[in-house]
Image (spheres, rainbow, N blue to C red):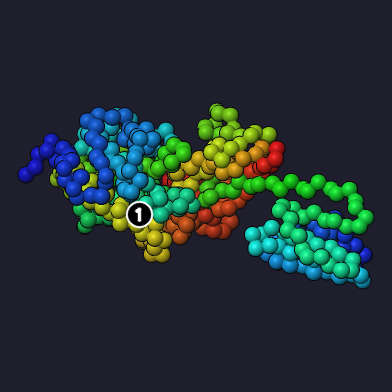
Amino acid sequence: MAEKNSRPFDVSTIKALVSLMHRHELTEIDLREGEMRIRLRRGPTGALQVATAAPALPAPVPVPESATVSTPPPKTEEAPKKELLTIKSPTPGTFYASPNPDAEPFVRVGSRVEPNTVVCIIEAMKIFNEITADCSGVIKEVLVENQQPVEFGQVLFTVDPNG
Amino acid sequence: MTSAHDANRFDLGRIQSETPVAEVRYFDRIDSTNNAALAMCQDIRSANSGFPSLIIAGTQTRGRGRGQNVWWSAGGALTFSLIVEPRVWNLAENRWPLLSLTAGLAVRHAISRTLPDHEVKLKWPNDVLLNGRKVAGILVEVGPLPRRLLVIGIGINVNNSFNAAPRELRTLATSLIDVAGMTHELTDILIRTINELDIQLGRLGRGDADLPADWQRCCALKGNSVTIEVGTTRTKGLCQGIDGDGALILLTEKGLARFYAGVVSHFE
């Protein structure tokens, strides 16, 4: 939870709380410190609802995406951190970055991908399976070396959907 | 007695009526049935059949095995490819690597039923051995996007004797005719194999918990000293068999090691 000396209106504290809620699938966090209070709720569709009050609490207002906070006095808000998407290996096997040893890699850092873009091959038990991005964006990281063994569900690439 | 020539002819009507394949395409001579099947994947319309198309070759001029290996194919070998609709079989992508072993098990059972007095085993991950020599190989490939049908290519040495083959090949490979001393109807072996595939793919799709035990029971490498090459790395160990997720397990100097890819270059 929030550290003793941090204030509930602190944006970084709220971000940490939001992260905790997602990680532990909490539907609500209600914190009070003196006359200050912060209540975070996730709506039925997963939308995050945020309310802060001192001391009377208005009804929570749905916030469609990341948390925004209205606090008196208003402060300059940090831009929400971009959430990176991941491309994972559907099977254990061997990672191949290119269609053959002499060819260019399917993608590099900075490559734009669409859902049907082939990003690598995973070989397992002699089956060479072309893996598609299944998302749109720009490759941010390539996390596996060519011909490296990979596990089921291992993250191979991160993708910036807003890149 | 059936002549070798007749035994090597296919009865397409029987294949169509005695197996669940939706259509049969026969080529007297073709480079590779898998190449033909992969090219056909785009045109497959039926979405309800588990086996939308079967491609049979009279003679395959450049059948492909693993990597650059070419399937040595004299007249009398059974070479065919099945197009498989994974959705009909409930085969999610994470199960595709198990297709080589599953198809291998089907081929193994079909041969064993034909020659019940002989030892037929799986050589991880995609070969079948008859009395310790290679009698069949399987090559599973994924069809083009966006549909991604699967192609299971199978080559079985049936009436192609290795008596005339190069000596080094004779020690590694064998055929049904060399072991049994008689010809077999290719149509019979083909129907038997497809119907076994029908059974085994069904088990894989249902997540049959006994399937891995069958791989294990039929594993030719278990108990053998095995050398496996993965890229440029060679590992030697005592084979413990095949794991439930299809991995080959070796007991090496550093402990147990699991392999999902690699070439078994030597075993004894």
Residue B103 picture location, percent across and down: 35, 50
Residue type indicated by callout 1: Leu
Q: Is residue A152 left or right of residue A27?
A: left
Q: Position of residue A13 (x, y in %)?
A: 84, 59
Q: Secondary structure at mark 1?
A: helix
Q: List x then y, in percent, for residue B26.
A: 23, 35
The residue located at (55%, 28%) in the rendering is A102
Instruction: Give the position of the N terminus of chain A as an image quadrant.
Output: bottom right
Question: Badge 1 sits on which subunit?
Answer: B
Q: Residues within 10 Å of mark 1 (few under 14, many from 20)?
A: many
Q: Quadrant of the C terminus of chain A?
A: top right
Residue drawn at (93%, 55%), measured in percent from left and top?
A73
Residue at the image position 91 percent from the left and 57 percent from the top: A72
Q: Is residue B264 visible?
A: yes
On the question of residue B236 being in view, the answer is no
Q: Which residue is mark 1?
A: B201
B50 relative to B66, above or below: below
Residue situated in front as seen by the camera: B159 or A127: A127
For the point 42% across and 33% down, which residue is it?
B68
Q: Quadrant of residue B90?
A: bottom left
Res B242 quadrant in image = bottom left
Q: Nearer the viewer, residue A58 or B26?
A: A58
Query: How many discs appear?
Result: 1
Q: On the picture, is B120 further left or further right than B18?
A: right
* Side of B10 relative to B244 (left or right): left
Q: Position of residue B121 (x, y in %)?
A: 33, 54
Residue A57 position by quadrant:
bottom right
Observer-nearest of B34 and B186: B34
